[in-house]
Image (cartoon, rainbow, N blue to C red):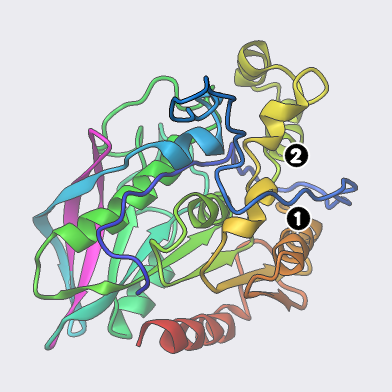
Amino acid sequence: MRLRGITCAAAGLLLAVTTACTGGDGGTTPETGPATTGAAEAPSPRGSSPSPAPVDPVSLPALMRREHTGSGLRLGDVLDRTSAYTRYAVTYQANGLTVSGIMNIPEGEGPFPALVLAHGYIDPDVYFSGQGMPREQDRLARSGYVVLHTDYRNHARSDDDPDNDVNLRLGYTEDVIGAALALRDSGRPEIDGDRIGLFGRSMGGGVVYNTLVVAPGLFDAAVAYAPVSARPQENIDHFQRPDGDPIVSEIEERHGTPEEDPAFWRGVSPLTYADRLTEPLLIQHGTADDTCPLTWSREAARVFQEAGKDVELRTVAGEGHTFGPRWAAEMDATEAFFERHLR
């Protein structure tokens, strides 16, 4: 692992996933950014130290500058025992909030490499702890990984963040970064804090993008399944606006539209900061995905690759958004990828 005990920062996209939507061409010119926070330095008086220019507090640069914390990993009730692993209810602290989740700990002698799982969009009103990636949780634990599936703030037993939706759900990526820091801080003998990977699907795939550009070096490798767009305005137009989601008008009232304030919308896209990515990333996306268009993943992979990053896009012929017949084969590829980088 390249960085240990680092101060990390996080951001998240507005990434609301619904069902059954049509494909489309991204049609926009990708933007790559500098390998810094992307915020300019303000001129300073002669003889004084330069001060960073102010940035919008709802932005990736603002969260890059933030000192993030993750600690207090607590194992609660045993939810299940199998011959391969034990499943626990857990909580941890992330930037002052309590976040709930589940953790699968393999049987046998550790320490084991760990994976943080970032689930896709599920209405928080119906979500239950650990929902969203049950197949992946089970298989990866059976393969010898500690699996920490975060519920995110506003979900299950996690603390509330009332501004999270109007602020483009930035907090979800803070919760993921807090999970990694809490794993390192836990001191548990089963967990190898020097080997941590990140795995997200759908909305969680967008959280993966943001985590990698905001906190380079925090994870050793990452996988995104069927991710949403790396441009938040595309997710709004694709998922929320057609459904008449009232939060859209609140977002645009507070932050402006892309036409009114293009700088704001560039500042919340991880493609603007593609140069910051340092970890290998595998993106897997089905060619028949009618929820998240494959063009979104093609654009993200192209922008990261043009920035010289180790990013592979694996297209899965005939598969839809949830991966059905090819799921096992794609998990083989996922495990092989994590094996190369975490074992």
Q: Amino acid at mark 1?
A: Trp
Q: Are marks 2 and 1 in contact (CB under 8 Å)?
A: yes
Q: Amino acid at mark 2?
A: Glu
Please say whether residue 246 is visible from this viewpoint. no
Question: Left of 92 or right of it: where is 47?
Answer: right
**Split into 4 quadrants, where in the image is the N terminus?**
bottom left
Is residue 88 in the magenta section? yes
Question: Magenta region, mostly helix, strand or loop?
Answer: strand
Please give the range of residues in magenta: 87-108
Q: Which residue is mark 1?
A: 296
Residue visible at 61% across and 41% down in the picture: 38
Up-down: is 271 above or below 68?
below
Displayed quadrant of residue 88: bottom left
From the top left corner, tell me how far across and down residue 199 is, in percent: 46, 65
Up-down: is 6 above or below 262?
below
Q: CA distance from mark 2 to mark 1?
A: 9 Å
Front residue of 107 and 3: 3
Classify 10 Å Cα crowding around label 2: few (below 14), some (14-19), many (20 and above). Answer: some
**Split into 4 quadrants, where in the image is the C terminus?**
bottom left
Which of the numbered marks, if any, corresponds to residue 234?
2
From the top left corner, tell me how far across and down residue 34 is, in percent: 65, 50
Residue visible at 83% across and 22% down in the picture: 259
First of labels 2, 1 by sequence position? 2
